[in-house]
Amino acid sequence: MSEKDQVNQEEMSFEEAMKQLEQIVEKLEEGDVPLEKAITYYQDGMKLSKVCNDKLNNVEKQMQQIMNDQGEFESFSVEEEE
């Protein structure tokens, strides 16, 4: 991806990044992608994964700042599904 693509990734929404990541996964799962193209898809997917992770971390930090009814800061953590 070019530097322009990376800037666009930072500006895209979480949903847009996830959609692009899902499209890359579908292409790679088909299995008929030339090796060089598969490597490019993989690299693009890793970058999109980082964008999604960064956006989720940012939201988690924002949620930690939500105040409870007493006006105190309330801790917020995301429980992972098993």
Image (cartoon, grey):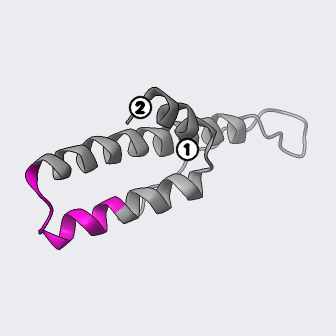
Amino acid type for the residue under numbered disc 2: Ser
Amino acid type for the residue under numbered disc 1: Leu
Of pointers 2 and 1, the one earlier in the residue sequence: 2
Pair 2/1: label in front: 2
Q: Which residue is mark 1?
A: 56
Q: Residue at x 17, y 45 (%)?
A: 39
Whether residue 16 sits left or right of residue 24 in the image: it is right
Whether residue 47 sits left or right of residue 72 in the image: it is left
Question: Residue 23 lies in what quarter of the image?
Answer: bottom left
Q: Which corner quadrant holds the C terminus?
A: bottom left
Whether residue 31 sits left or right of residue 62 in the image: it is left
Q: Secondary structure at mark 1?
A: helix
Q: Residue at x 63, y 39 (%)?
A: 11
Q: Position of residue 70 (x, y in %)?
A: 90, 40
Residue 60 part of the magenta segment: no
Q: Which residue is mark 2?
A: 2
Label the magenta part by its dominant secondary structure.
helix
Q: Position of residue 57 (x, y in %)?
A: 55, 37
Q: Position of residue 8 (x, y in %)?
A: 57, 38
Between the C-alphas of marks 2 and 1, the distance is 24 Å
Question: In the image, which residues are magenta?
Answer: 24-35
Tell me whether the residue at label 2 lies in contact with that at label 1, contact meaning CB atoms closer than 8 angstroms: no
